[in-house]
Amino acid sequence: MKPKFLILCLTLWSVTSLAACNTIRGAGRDVSAGGAVVSDAASKVQSDIAASKAKQDAQDEADRKAAVRAKPHSN
């Protein structure tokens, strides 16, 4: 009876181990895909921030030039 039980245990262990490998591989792919989505979103936010900053800098420069032109010159 012991050898049959041992063979049964080893068989179950082997099947479980192989199934776990595929499950872990799938989970790794899911995590990797999720990481790619987060990375893409972060890149988009960074480019949006850079564009917004450039726009604000241009507006600030235009405001500064307008203020200089509007300032009366005293001689």
Image: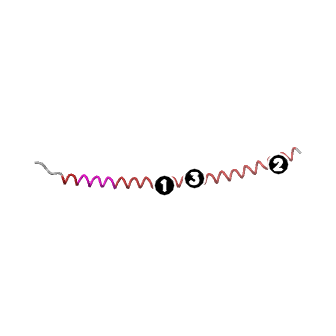
Instruction: Identify the secondary structure beneath mark 2.
Output: helix
Relative depth, front residue between 45 and 14: 45
Q: Which of marks 2 and 1 is in front?
A: 1
Q: In this view, does 59 lie to the left or right of 5?
A: left
User: Which amino acid, mark 3?
Assistant: Ser
Q: Name the residue under label 3.
A: 32
Question: In the drawing, what numbered circle is on residue 63?
Answer: none
Residues at marks 1 and 3 touching, judged by CB atoms closer than 8 Å: no
Question: Which numbered disc, 3 or 2, marks the residue that appears first in the sequence?
Answer: 2
Crowding near pointer 2: few (<14 within 10 Å), some, many (20+)? few
Q: Which amino acid does label 1 sit on?
A: Ala
Q: Nearer the viewer, residue 15 or 66?
A: 66
Residue pictured at 34% horizontal, 55% vertical: 55
Tags 2 and 1 touching, CB below 8 Å: no
The quadrant of the rendering that contains the N terminus is top right
The residues colored magenta run: 55-65
> Residue at horizontal 19%, vertical 54%?
70
Q: In which quarter of the image is residue 47?
A: bottom left
